Image: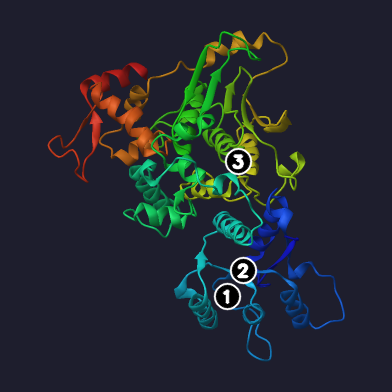
Amino acid sequence: MSVATIFVSSVQKEFAEERRAIRAFVEGDPLLRRYFRVFLFEDLPAGDRRVDDVYLSEVERCDVYVGLFGNDYGFEGTSGVSPTEIEFNAATARSKTRLIFIAGDAGSRHPKMATLVAKAEAQLVRRRFEGVTELIAVLYASLVDHLERAGALRMKPFDAAACPDAGLVDIDPVRVELFLSRAHSQRGYALLPGTPIESALSHLNLFDHERPTHAAVLLFARDPQRFLPSSEIKCMHFHGLEVRKPIPSYQIYKGTLFELVDHAVDFVMSKLARQVGTRAAGPQAPVEYELPRDVVSEAIVNAVAHRDYASNASVQVMLFADRLEVWNPGELPAALTIAELRRPHASIPRNPLIADPMFLAAYAEKAGSGILDMIARSREAGLKAPEFRQSGGQFVQTMWRPVSTSTPQVAPQVAPQVAPQVAPELRLAYAVRGEMTRQELQDALGLKDRKHFRESYLDPALAAGLIEWTRPDEPNSSRQRYRLTPKGAEAAAQRS
């Protein structure tokens, strides 16, 4: 298969960011750039030709037409028809492969755009998207499917390929349900809790010929490491400035990608120095860590979402006396350099079908902004900006702690400042203020995965007698709250 041209419709401002992101992603993806090039109308130099002649000739030459339909209809020429609709009609008349993606709110849609959307829906399957991250994921799945049907692919990309020996029975319905609940509340995701597993996975493009993909297993399987042993995450804590044995604290975490992130972030935060403020501004005293939690979380999410899962290496999180290093197997896309990471840039995810659910569950933020946010938050905290490098097939993120690293003698000075590791059930007890719901407790601890919170924090705290139900006879009541027991109040008092 020769290199095919993708014609991206719509010159209206509504999708300026999405159009640039499509080109950056296709040109940066090691698979797609072998088969596709992207045409954007605004890239054409000025010339003595009618505008409509130019874009119609490009539709004529293209192999794949990508239509982005939103709320705006766009400029209407003398015929009263926008370029977007003219392009769609031309692609239809010439039997081009058409991939249509719908955004926006039907209630706010221009009447003519509503008619165009209805026309497209009557002719072909179209997909909805909310934002750049979801668009990239659904486009990626559609282009891979196009290549497969064209006979160009003998093997699908890792995240889109079926996981050998895995079936729908291996997907945990509870994990899918928790994801849908969070995605709907955090991002307004269209699918509601209660959606059948098959429909949920299909909507996320996580099926390959009716079998769960590697991405589906990593995100929602009961035991992902049974199929992908290297998907675990290794966390180490060193008191000095370099890797030295014996390692004072070493944990290997397993579970879904959501659980891995929560475990690893919890490991790091439990070992950082922290400062507890006063309750002058409210009932809960603010806690500030020497490394901002969202910086730590972003680095770990980057490693988990963008690592090379075909590698036998695992993600490694290493906390030293002067820095936090997060290593993941894989390299930056060819279209990105280390220097470009520090400037606004398009998102070019290695695993789009993993990155999209991570975004929908609010583990990752707006596409392309994560590293810039890390840099900004570090500077706001008075810290040296994070550093990034490639090292032997590994991508390394380094976050600097607020200590001098001029001499190795810094380690003994730092150790007394680092708060001792606190058992999860005690950390939960410290967070209780009056009577609180489960969600309020989870939010107070900064944890996102409900299963991890329940198994590692809530259930142990109840079993240890540190907290109790306000409605012990109605354990599943929607009005259930949690409060400290006398034992828990005593523990909290000793801590303060």
**Residue under label 2:** 14
- Residue 495, percent across and down? 36, 18
* Secondary structure state at the residue bearing disc 2: helix
- Residue 2, percent across and down? 75, 61
**Residue under label 3:** 306
Name above or below for residue 235 compared with residue 446. above
Whole-Å distance between the Cαs marked 2 and 3? 28 Å
Rendered residue at 38%/37% (across/down):
222
Whether the residues at callouts 3 and 1 have beta carbons within 8 Å, the answer is: no
Question: Which of pointers 1 and 2 lies earlier in the amino acid sequence?
Answer: 2
Where does the N terminus fall, quadrant-wise? bottom right
Whether the residues at callouts 2 and 3 have beta carbons within 8 Å, the answer is: no
Whether the residues at callouts 1 and 2 have beta carbons within 8 Å, the answer is: yes
- Label 2 Cα neighbours within 10 Å, binned few <14 / some 14-19 / many ≥20: some
Give the amino acid at mark 1.
Answer: Asp
Residue 376, quarter of picture: top right
Q: Is residue 446 left or right of residue 300?
A: left
Give the amino acid at mark 3.
Answer: His
**Residue under label 1:** 72
Can see residue 95? yes
User: Which residue occupies the extreme left position in the image?
Assistant: 473
Give the amino acid at mark 2.
Answer: Glu
